[in-house]
Amino acid sequence: MAKGRELKGRIKSVENTRKITRTMEMVAASKMKRAMDRVVAARPYAGALGEVMSRLYSAELAEQFPLLRQPTQVRRAAVLLITANRGLSGAFNANLIRESRGLIAQLERDGVEVDLHAVGRKGLGYYRYIGRAIASSRIDIGDRPTTQNAAELVDGLMDSFANGGLDAVYIVHAHFRSAISTPPTTERILPVTPPERAQGRQYDYLLFPSAEEILSSLLPAYVRNMVYRALVENTAAFYSAQRTAMKNATDNASDMLKILGRTYNRARQANITQEIAEIVGGAAALQG
C-alpha cells in the first residue's frame, strides 16, 4: 500500500495548496474592487482637466510654456516603468517589462539616449539582473497610490524637460479597461499634447486672471494626474491579474484532485483484489 500512502500524501498537499490559492483569489478580488473604485473616481477629474486644457490651448500660448515645447529632434528621453512589487499574477509583470523593452529598443534604434526610471520590485529586479543602469527607483508605493506619490515621481522629470535636459517622457503601465482586459500600454506624458476638443455644445469661458496664469498651474497638475491615473490603473490591473491567476490555480488543483482521487481508488482496488487473490490462493493450497 506504499503507493496508496504516497497518493494520499499528494492529495493532502494539493488540498492545502487549493485552500491557499482560493484564499488568495478572494483577497485579490476584494482588493481589485477597491482599486477599481479608485480608477472610476479618478476618471471624472481627469476628463474635466483634459476638457479645460483643450479649451485653453492655442499655438500662441504653447510657445510660452516649456511643458508644451515640441522638440524638433528627440535626443534624450525618460521611460517611467510601473510594475508590481509582488508576483503570482500570471504574465502581468512580464508583459509590462516586454512593453518597456520594446519601447527602449525602438528609441535607441532612433539614436535616443534613454534614462530608465523603475517603479515596483519586479521591473527593478529584472533590469538590475540584465545589468541596465537605473536612473531612479521606487518600491515603497503601496496598493493605494496618492497624488503625492505621482508628484514625487514626475516633478523631477518635468523640471528636466523644462530645462532642456529631456526631450520626451514616456510612461509604461497596465491600462485597466475591465477586469479581464488590462493590456500594457505606453503613453507619452511630455511634451504635453492637449486632448482634442469634444464635439457638441460649445461653452464660453471667463478666464481670470488670464489663460497664461491658469495654464501655468494647470499643466503640472495635468501631468501629475496622468501619472496618478497610471498608478491606480496599474494597481487595479495587478489585482485583476492575480485574481485570475489564483482562480486558474484553484481550478487546476481541483482537476488534479479528481485525477489523484481516481488513481488512488484504482490503486486501492488493485491492492484489495491482490489481497483477496492471495487469500483465495492460500485457502486453495490448504485444501489441496
Image (tube, helix red, strand yellow):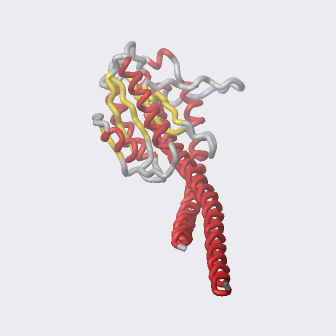
Question: As drawn, which residue projects farthest toward the front?
Answer: 288
- Which corner quadrant holds the N terminus? bottom right
Q: Is residue 172 visible?
A: yes
**Against 132, is 255 above or below?**
below
Question: As drawn, which residue projects farthest toward the right?
Answer: 200
Image location (x, y in percent) of residue 190: 43, 27
**Tally of numbered discs:** 0
- In the image, taking residue 82 as reference, residue 247 lies left or right, namely right
Q: Residue at x 59, y 49 (%)?
A: 36
Image location (x, y in percent) of residue 134: 30, 37
Q: Is residue 34 visible?
A: no
Q: Residue at x 56, y 26 (%)?
A: 195
Q: Residue at x 52, y 36 (%)?
A: 184
Q: Nearer the viewer, residue 218 or 101?
A: 101
Image location (x, y in percent) of residue 172: 46, 34
Q: Nearer the viewer, residue 270 or 246?
A: 270
Q: Nearer the viewer, residue 31 or 5?
A: 5
Image location (x, y in percent) of residue 271: 61, 73
- Which corner quadrant holds the C terminus? bottom right
Question: As drawn, which residue projects farthest toward the top?
Answer: 72
**Against 110, is 283 above or below?**
below
Q: Nearer the viewer, residue 200 or 176?
A: 176
**Against 285, is 252 above or below?**
above
